[in-house]
Amino acid sequence: MRTFVRRERWGTPQQLAKRARRIFGSPTWWARSRSFGVDIRPELTDGIRGEWLEPRGPLPGLILYVHGGGYVACSAVTHRPVTAALARMTQRKVFSLEYRLAPEHPFPAAFDDALAAYRWIVAHEEPSQLAFVGDSAGGGLVLAVLVAARDAGLPMPAVAVLYSPWTDMEGTAEAGTSDSEKCAMFAPANIHDFGNAYLDTASRRDVRASPGLADLSGLPPILIQAGDTELLLGDAARVDRSIRQHGGSSELHVFEHVFHGWQMLEGLMPEATAALRQSADFVCDHLEPGTAGALPRRAANIHISETHAN
């Protein structure tokens, strides 16, 4: 990861997007190889674009998934190793959203697409049987949409899962931390590089882009996962703390010795399988009819720490 991904600066927004699209996400052959056990079909309805992943004999309930990629890269296809695994492990259908990417479509395009998809889903599905899941930038979009949905009086999903969410465009949670140089993929200055590519001239403190700065009261139960050396651990810890300070339910689980987005290597890395199994069980525990997943939350040979940072 340090050799092929990490760099101090990523260049102009156009250069950044080109590089990110070349190296982020899983290659097509890996995405296809991890798509077993699910039927996949594209969706384009009312401007909502994405793909459905349906396991054999699905249980009631649905997962709405928002992929990461720094707002400039990746797709529903690149994230099939995660979405297909969640479909198999939870036995629920997954809708994986395709949103417009920056810099061609700057803020708030991605947020608008994610909010429109959420409105579309809750208009057709029972919210008590809905899980809302996202990774990295997608995790930030999930949190931003939850805040916007709450403020608009829309029904909340039953549960949400955030994999290493990016929730602060200013990077204040990472500023001055001694661990920032340990991240295998990103340097602290990259927060501003990717933020510039997405925001253009918009404020970095707009809560639609930096939901970690918002009032996080009134949200559904949330599971957050992060690696112990990744740059966005500070984001994850602050969101977890803010939710609990506002009386909400949040669990932060920190995995040791993993890089950002390690869940993408499910089937190859034991830590990825453990993380997805944990989150699948968390989803199953909160969806009606409340049937917990058959897989254990913790793999015996993988160390996971449950953290509630002060």
Image (spheres, rainbow, N blue to C red):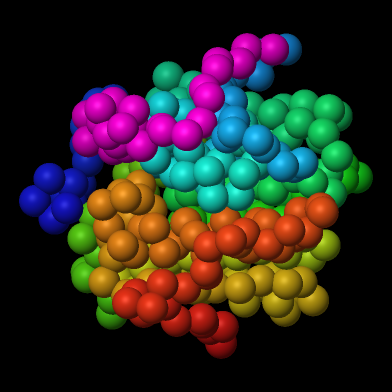
- Count the numbered circles shown: 0
Please say whether residue 32 is one of the residues in the magenta stretch. Answer: yes
**Left or right for 101, reference 147:** left
Q: Residue at x 32, y 77 (%)?
A: 301
Quarter of the picture containing the C terminus is bottom right
Find residue 62 and report its horizontal and vertical position in percent: 70, 40
Q: Residue at x 73, y 72 (%)?
A: 249
**Left or right for 174, reference 152:** left
Above or below for 44 versus 292: above
Please say whether residue 215 is one of the residues in the magenta stretch. Answer: no
Q: Residue at x 35, y 50 (%)?
A: 266
Q: Is residue 281 visible?
A: yes
Q: Going by the picture, which residue comes out furthest to the bottom?
A: 310
Above or below for 292 versus 105: below
Find residue 104 and report its horizontal and vertical position in percent: 43, 19
Above or below for 65 versus 239: above
Q: Which residues are magenta?
A: 20-45
**Left or right for 281, reference 236:** right
Find residue 85 and report its horizontal and vertical position in percent: 47, 44
Above or below for 18 versus 293: above
**Left or right for 10, reference 68:** left
Q: Residue at x 72, y 79 (%)?
A: 245
Find residue 32 and report its horizontal and vertical position in percent: 34, 28
